[in-house]
Image (cartoon, rainbow, N blue to C red):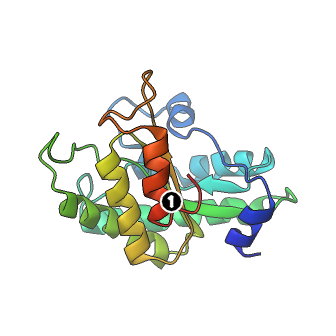
Amino acid sequence: MNFRDFLKENIVRLDGGMGTLLQAQGLMPGELPERWNLTHPEAIINIHKNYYAAGSHVVNTNTFGANILKFSAEELESIVKAAVENAKTARAQSTHPEAKWVALDIGPTGRMLAPYGDLDFEDAVSIFAETVKLGVKYGADLIFIETMNDSYETKAALLAAKENSALPVFVSNAYGEDGKLMTGASPEAMCALLEGMGGDAI
């Protein structure tokens, strides 16, 4: 079934946390969880399977921090490839009757964009584009840009997704107690921006 058609007619259930579950299984402080796609694939597959069993329509690959700033190009490709394959394996093994999809998970770069930090907008787009291209190459069904607290970085990630794929894109932001992003944007402003840029769900 086409995911965009499903989205129009159904309430779509996503999965939950990944990092906290990996910590419970032994992920050490400072250890990059994305490497577990390669070193502990059975643990990742099991987490995905449990989310599918709980009724998730979409599971997010274990790629929240997978970008070219943290990994070499070669390792990044291996990580994204394994992450998508782990999620697909979980989907194939799942007996839950719900429709199931795999989302390429994209989180913040870990760097602040100018003028608040030293990362240029164009460079941020290029960083996200590398991960997006790999997600497309290895067969993700959609892209989930999540937990962004910088309006510029959110825009950079969505632009990279739209320029380098035809996949549906979900976007989520993390707002402070004042109801605004760290960079000051309100939910209303972000919805207007992201809807205008073609986000499928915000």
For this orientation, the residue located farthest to the top is 177
Residue at 69%, 70% (x, y): give it: 3
Determine the residue located farthest toward the left in the rendered image: 118
Say how many tags the image has: 1
Kindly identify which residue carries mark 1: 195
From this view, report whether residue 24 is shown above or below residue 1. above
Q: Amino acid at mark 1?
A: Glu
Left or right: 12, with 156 as reference point? right
Q: Place residue 175 in its image quadrant.
A: top left
- Please provide percent x and percent y for residue 160: 35, 67
The structure residue drawn at horizontal position 28% and vertical position 43%, both measured from the top left corner, is 110
Few, some or many residues within 10 Å of mark 1 (<14, 14–19, 20+) = some
- Tell me if 153 is positioned left or right of 172 in this view: left
Q: Is residue 126 visible?
A: yes
Q: Secondary structure at mark 1?
A: helix
Q: Look at the image and tell me whether residue 38 can be seen.
A: no
Residue plotted at (69% across, 59% down): 90
- Where residue 118 appears, as percent x and y from the top left, is 11, 46
Residue 191 location (% of width, % of height): 50, 50
Q: Quadrant of the N terminus?
A: bottom right
Q: Quadrant of residue 155?
A: bottom left
* 80 and 153: which is toward the camera: 153
| Location of residue 87 in the rendering, given as x and y in whole percent from the top left corner | 61, 60
Q: Is residue 56 left or right of residue 85?
A: right
Who is closer to the viewer here, 138 or 93? 138
